[in-house]
Image (tube, grey):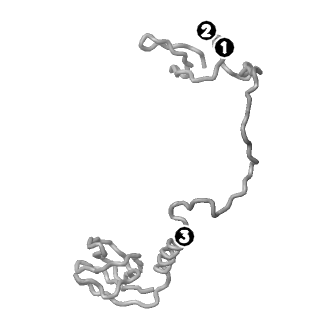
């Protein structure tokens, strides 16, 4: 590695010549105006003692007592309302207590299942409570964690509604 310089646009840059390429130098250096000394093991950064910096103010111990009541809750924290929603989501994933066969039809289901069990592979065409349709390629033995308002007539899979 050799120190070199390269000129670009009339400006000279310090560079290191590495494997035939000039790489611009970004090295820590020191020196008075017009001179530069690279910091290295042989030339450590000089440290001089000057006027000490005055530090004033109130300093606190490294640990402080914290009251939970004084801290604001982050978004999505486990409040009572969030716990109810979380409990409902976990219950939707728990074992079914009953089930019913679903015949595809372009009408709302009389009972909204917690999820669907696929007994025969195929396409599952559903309509959500928002009125939007979606088609899923499903496989026998799969549990689909959705609560459709309708299982549409384009469905070729055989599905069973699971109730928690």
> Could you give the CA–CA distance between mark 2 and mark 1, rounded to whole angstroms?
8 Å
Whole-percent x and y of residue 70?
A: 63, 60
144 left or right, relative to 14: left
Residue on which the image places disc 1: 31
Instruction: Assess whether mark 1 and mark 2 are in contact (beta carbons under 8 angstroms).
Output: yes
86 left or right, relative to 121: right
Q: Quadrant of the N terminus?
A: top right
How many numbered marks does the figure carry? 3
- Secondary structure, mark 1, is loop
Of residues 39 and 122, the one nearer the viewer is 39
Of residues 137 and 132, the one nearer the viewer is 132
Labelled disc at residue 79: 3
Whole-percent x and y of residue 89?
A: 47, 76
Residue drawn at x 70%, y 22% is 40
Query: Residue 40, relative to residue 115: is it above or below?
Result: above
> Could you give the CA–CA distance between mark 3 and mark 1, rounded to whole angstroms?
61 Å
Query: Residue 44, relative to residue 69: is it above or below?
Result: above
Whole-percent x and y of residue 24?
A: 52, 21
> Could you give the CA–CA distance between mark 2 and mark 3, rounded to whole angstroms?
65 Å
Residue drawn at x 28%, y 87% is 103
- Secondary structure, mark 2, is loop
Labelled disc at residue 91: none
Mark 2 surroundings within 10 Å by alpha-carbon count, few (fewer than 14), some (14 through 19), many (20 or more)? few
């Amino acid at each position: 590695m050799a120190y070199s310089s390269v000129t670009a646009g009339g400006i000279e840059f310090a560079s290191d010549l590495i494997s035939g390429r000039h790489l611009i130098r970004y090295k820590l250096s020191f020196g008075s105006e017009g001179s530069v000394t690279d910091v290295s093991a042989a030339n450590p950064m000089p440290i001089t003692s000057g006027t000490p910096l005055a530090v004033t103010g109130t300093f606190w111990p490294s640990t402080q007592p914290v009251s939970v009541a004084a801290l604001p809750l982050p978004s999505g924290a486990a409040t009572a309302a969030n716990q109810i929603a979380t409990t409902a989501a976990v219950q939707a994933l728990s074992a079914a207590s009953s089930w019913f066969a679903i015949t595809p039809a372009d009408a709302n289901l009389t009972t909204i299942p917690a999820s669907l069990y696929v007994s025969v592979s195929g396409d599952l065409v559903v309509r959500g409570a928002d009125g939007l349709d979606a088609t899923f390629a499903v496989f026998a033995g799969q549990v689909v964690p959705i609560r459709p308002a309708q299982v549409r007539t384009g469905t070729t899979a055989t599905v069973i509604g699971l109730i928690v």
